Image: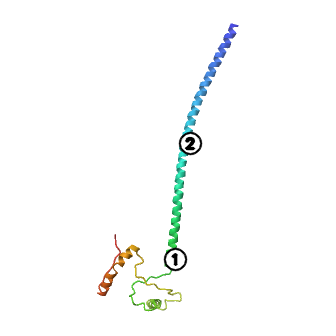
């Protein structure tokens, strides 16, 4: 009986050793799983931060896009207005003051017909209205104001029949 008890104790000891080996393996695998979980958690945290940054950047870009879209529309309207305001218009520079008489439209019509010849002026040719401009409309208002400040000097030079020129400022 002692032998069977001894064999049973040895079998229990073997089972205990086998069980401890399995528990150690389970602890190693649990440690590996915890390490993998930690790495995945860190990657998820980094991706969440990147996603948050991208969301912020996306909102900034949406705001900028809306602003630029509004600006483009404003500029398109201004360009269309400018195109419409200059459509079919001719600017004639250099006619002497006093040539216009009472009816500037009639004077310009006869001047253009004499310049081009009556056969070149078909029924499509017509003047709707004539404007006399004393300022320099192609310059910015600040430049126009500076140029206008020399009107008296230019008038004096014309009275004395002296030649002069006024150039656009380079700086």
Left or right: 3 in relation to 36: right
Q: Secondary structure at mark 2?
A: helix
User: Is residue 57 at least partly visible in the picture?
Assistant: yes
Residue beneath disc 1: 84
Left or right: 97 in relation to 43: left
- Asked where in the image residue 150 lies, by quadrant, the reply is bottom left
> How far across and how far down the image is residue 152, in percent?
33, 82
The residue under the point 53% across, 64% down is 69
Residue beneath disc 2: 44
Q: Residues within 10 Å of mark 2 (few under 14, many from 20)?
A: few
> How far across and how far down the image is residue 59, in percent?
54, 55
- Relative vertical location of residue 105 with respect to residue 145 in this rendering, above or below: below
The residue under the point 63% across, 22% down is 19
Out of 90 and 142, give the one closest to the viewer.
142
Out of 66 and 23, give the one closest to the viewer.
66
> How far across and how far down the image is residue 127, in percent?
50, 87
The residue under the point 54% across, 61% down is 66
- Mark toward the start of the polypeptide (2 vs 1): 2
Q: Residues within 10 Å of mark 1 (few under 14, many from 20)?
A: few
């Amino acid at each position: 009986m002692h032998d069977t008890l001894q064999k049973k104790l040895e079998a229990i000891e073997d089972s205990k050793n086998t069980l401890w080996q399995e528990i150690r393996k389970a602890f190693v695998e649990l440690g590996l799983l915890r390490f993998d979980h930690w790495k995945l958690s860190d990657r998820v945290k980094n991706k969440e931060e990147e996603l948050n940054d991208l969301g912020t950047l996306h909102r900034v870009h949406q705001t900028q896009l809306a602003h630029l879209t509004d600006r483009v529309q404003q500029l398109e309207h201004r360009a269309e207005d400018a195109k419409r305001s200059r459509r079919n218009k001719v600017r004639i520079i250099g006619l002497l003051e006093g040539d216009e008489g009472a009816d500037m439209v009639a004077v310009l019509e006869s001047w253009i017909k004499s310049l081009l010849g009556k056969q070149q002026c078909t029924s499509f040719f017509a003047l709707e209205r004539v404007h006399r401009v004393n300022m320099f409309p192609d310059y910015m208002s600040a430049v126009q104001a500076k140029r206008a400040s020399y009107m008296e000097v230019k008038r004096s030079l014309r009275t004395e029949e002296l030649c002069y020129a006024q150039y656009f400022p380079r700086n």
